[in-house]
Amino acid sequence: MIKVVYFFKRRPEMSVEAFQDHWGTTHAQLITALPGIRRYVQNHTLPSAYRKGEPAFDGVAESWFDDTGAMKALASTPQYAAVLADEPAFIDHASMGSIITEEHVIKDGPAPEGGVKTVDLVTRRAGMPIDAFFKYWRDDHGPLGAASPAVRRYVQSHTRRSIYDSGRTPAYDGAAMMWFDDMETLRTASRTPEFERLRADIDNFIARDKSPFVIAAERVVLA
């Protein structure tokens, strides 16, 4: 199973409310009609993120497929054509990107209903080999995140190794996702020793200035 992580901003003239409504209704229906899609999740950036300016992205979507063959088979279908035709109605295409990933579940807890979810798009530190990065992220940094009682679920999505083998440079080296009961739980957790150790470790393998994040409300559209 592979997972494609998409990230994008809304059209500049569009309100956040209108963007979320179109994405969550019209576009969601088009996505779930795609042949071969196994699971589809939308992550809507929380309204509170807009109080201090524009967040990195207005939304992050996750789509699961059996393999890359299933993805490629979509290209010639009318359902995929309908998805592409609808994107300009609400997405700023210049902001849109994606990575094809493989999931590593670090903490296999239930996602809390009505909770909040942090989505970090991760770029490795300059000069760090990709295999060393993946190993450190999963085996060394992963347990630091899982150690926090406030983290209900923790998943790392590593950009597929084949992307690098082909000579391409992905937009990001992966995405980290953590689930919390609510925003207050996340705020409280950020002041704990567990999170201090987590933050202190970031510079060992991540380029902070190239690793944006959003805090979002998760909507499972297709389970």
Image (tube, rainbow, N blue to C red):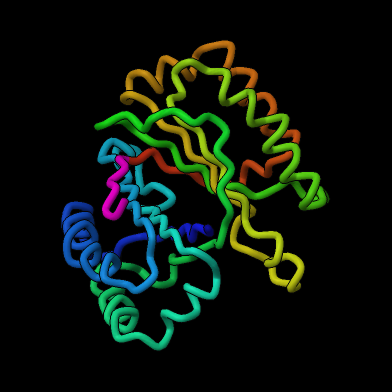
Q: From this viewpoint, is residue 56 visible? A: yes
Q: Is residue 210 visible?
A: no
Task: Determine whether, in the image, residue 185 is placed left or right of residue 73.
Answer: left
Percent x, y of residue 34: 32, 72
170 over 191 or under it: above or below:
below
Query: Which residue is found at the position 35% from the left and 85% from the top?
Result: 77
Q: Residue at x 51, y 43 (%)?
A: 120
Q: Main secondary structure of the magenta part?
A: strand
Q: Residue at x 17, y 60 (%)?
A: 25
Left-right relation of 198 to 131: left
Question: Vertical placement of 211 versus 65: above or below?
Answer: above
User: In which quarter of the view is residue 116 placed?
Assistant: top left
> Is residue 220 on the magenta stretch?
yes
In the figure, residue 45 lies in which quadrant? top left
Specify whether residue 3 is painted magenta: no
Which of these two is toward me, 65 or 185? Answer: 65
The quadrant where residue 67 appears: bottom right
Tell me the magenta residue range: 217-223
Q: Position of residue 199 (x, y in %)?
A: 62, 26
Q: Position of residue 220 (x, y in %)?
A: 29, 48
Kindly identify the residue that appears in the image at 31 percent across and 51 percent down. 223
Closest to the observer, 98 or 13: 98
For this rendering, which residue is in front, 191 or 24? 24
Taking the image as shown, residue 166 lies to the left or right of residue 172, namely right
Seen from this angle, which residue lies furthest top? Answer: 193
Left or right: 192 as drawn, with respect to 83: right
